[in-house]
Amino acid sequence: MATAVALSALPLLEQCADGRESPGDKREWGILQVAEYDNRSRTLTGIEFKTVAGYELMAVPRDGDFHPIWVMLKPQHGALYKQMPEGDFALAGNQLAELVQRGGVTPIVEKALTAHLRPATQ
């Protein structure tokens, strides 16, 4: 009897897990997928922001073709840095500083975005 109860609770425990493949993680990736799909033919001249289902997304121009790369600024589940599609982009130091100052990014996202800072021009 105890084994049957434990086995019947297993699916519920799996749903409560908060990691890769968790429902929350899949939902966040799905939000990024829709943003990417709906905007893949566009080109950007600068950074744009969009709020979807309570998540703030940042679109940045991809190096080379200026198509949007979407970054979730405050992911809560699974991978704590989410970007779609893959690609490189550049941010100015003042752009990142502004995001951090207004509390718009998690510490992990801030660290990841730091890798995309472009050198200051003189």
Image (spheres, helix red, strand yellow):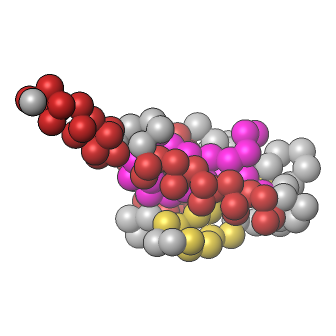
Where is residue 48 drawn, in percent x and y?
68, 69
Where is residue 42 drawn, in percent x and y?
88, 65
Residue 87, visible in the rendered structure: yes
The residue under the point 51% across, 72% down is 53
Residue 9: quadrant of the picture: top left
Closer to the camera, 14 or 49? 14
The residue under the point 9% across, 30% down is 1
Q: Which residues are magenta?
A: 68-91
Residue 92, visible in the rendered structure: no
- Magenta stretch contains residue 71: yes
In the displayed structure, 14 sits above or below 33; it is above
The dominant secondary structure in magenta is loop
In the displayed structure, 87 sits above or below 58; it is above
Left-right relation of 104 to 45: left
Left-right relation of 107 to 95: left
In the displayed structure, 21 sits above or below 55; it is above
The residue under the point 49% across, 66% down is 55
Q: Residue furthest top?
A: 3
Where is residue 64 drawn, in percent x and y?
89, 45
Where is residue 63 drawn, in percent x and y?
82, 45
In the displayed structure, 55 sits above or below 1; it is below
Left-right relation of 8 to 72: left
- Magenta stretch contains residue 88: yes
Closer to the camera, 7 or 48? 7
The residue under the point 70% across, 63% down is 35
Residue 102: quadrant of the picture: bottom left
